[in-house]
Amino acid sequence: MRPAGRPGRLVAYACLVNDLPTAPVAACGLIAGFGVAVATGSRPLGGLVLAIFGIWCLVAWDRRDGRRIAVQLGGCGLGAFIASHILGLVIGAWPAVFVAAAFTATMSWRLSDARRRTPGGRLARGA
């Protein structure tokens, strides 16, 4: 039995999902996934890193903003990932990854993070 007043792991995770902005997490997921793939030479390992970040963001968007926003932002991230491969042929791999990360972070901020509500129920700044 857990002592009263001590949140469990699930409650602590839910607070982390609700409080942490997703824009930097989404951007870092693209950059870290590509970095791991380059550093290890293993594209599947880089994809796993990208998937972990992406799933975390999808869960956060679904909990905070609903399924519609989660699907929209997931599509933005997937589209940016695909576009980075095409753009990489023109401007290089790393610059393309940074462009895709910037786009994904911007959309995450506009559609989710800037619209977060404060504990008092008011819209957070920038909404």
Image (cartoon, grey):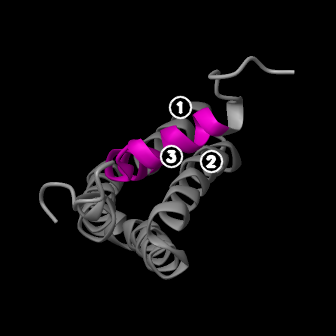
Q: CA distance from mark 1 to mark 2?
A: 18 Å
Which amino acid, mark 2?
A: Ile
Tell me the number on the disc at residue 79. Answer: none
Quadrant of the rendered image containing residue 65: bottom left
Q: In this figure, which residue is indicated by the disc labeled 1?
A: 39
* Residue shown at the point (54%, 67%) measured from the top left: 62
Front residue of 64 and 94: 64
Looking at the rendering, the stretch of residues picked out in magenta corresponds to: 11-29
Does 94 appear in magenta? no
Where does label 3 land, which residue? 17
* Distance of label 2 from label 3 (alpha carbons): 14 Å
Is residue 22 covered in magenta? Answer: yes
* Label 3 – label 1 distance at C-alpha: 29 Å
Name the amino acid type tagged 3.
Answer: Val
* Mark earlier in primary sequence (2, 3): 3
- Of badges 2 and 3, nearer the viewer stands 3
